[in-house]
Amino acid sequence: YTRLRYLWANERPMSVAGRRLEFARLEAERPAGLPGHYVALKVYTSDCLPATDENSRVLSETVDRLAEHTPVVLLSDQAAYDDHRDFGIQREPGVVRSKQSDPRHNLADKASVVAGASALVCTYGGFSYLGAFLGVPAVTLHSHATFNPVHPRVARLACSTMGLPAPTMLGMSDSTPNQAIAALGAADGAGLHR
């Protein structure tokens, strides 16, 4: 991260990333016991998606709409590993919770669930890039653009270089549920069907 500080500060052109970084697709085994087609969902609080009543309402509507089209596998954490907290999406029809992982295997287990998914819907942040690097179409959600705008640009460059779909970033609004469905329906292999 430090070696690229001038890139992250937007003081160097994007071509620096192309010359200094090597991008590689990630691989993970699909876990047993999940539906044949599903959307993986990981929504947690962050600076760019704080725990507000409005964000909770829009997320709930988004999950409801997704579950109308396809099973949703919720990637939740009962344990707190950092300052992010799950939004507390309740078990609803069409929503199943992934099994809890041993903290030592948490990321690998979640990567497996994402790798087997038709799509990933999650809070914008580091986890949202996991879908892209696994070749899984991703929709990322935020209500405040507090993130470094260079990060998504580098992600798009990485995805383009690897021939993978770049994440679709959506700001939270009343139209977010419909936008998420449209973005996933347009993605190759999204499989938004029961």
Image: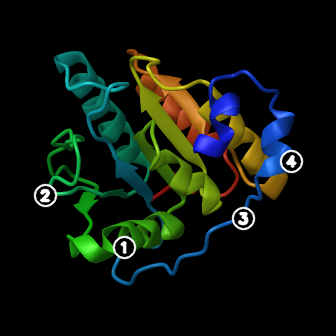
Q: Which mark is residue 166?
A: none
Instruction: Look at the image and tell me whether residue 190 can be seen.
Output: no
Between discs 4 and 3, the one toward the N terminus: 4
Q: Which residue reaches farthest bottom?
A: 32
Q: Which residue is mark 3?
A: 24
Residue nearest the viewer, comparing 122 with 65? 122
Judging from the image, what secondary structure is the residue with disc 4 in? helix
Mark closer to the chain start, 4 or 1: 4
Pick the residue in front: 137 or 108: 108
Query: Which amino acid is tagged 3?
Result: Ala
Q: Residues within 10 Å of mark 2 (few under 14, many from 20)?
A: few
Secondary structure of the residue carrying numbered label 3: loop
> Where residue 37 sits in the image (x, y, percent)?
48, 66
Q: Residue at x 28, y 75 (%)?
A: 104
In this rendering, position of residue 181 left or right of residue 152? left
Q: Which residue is mark 2?
A: 78
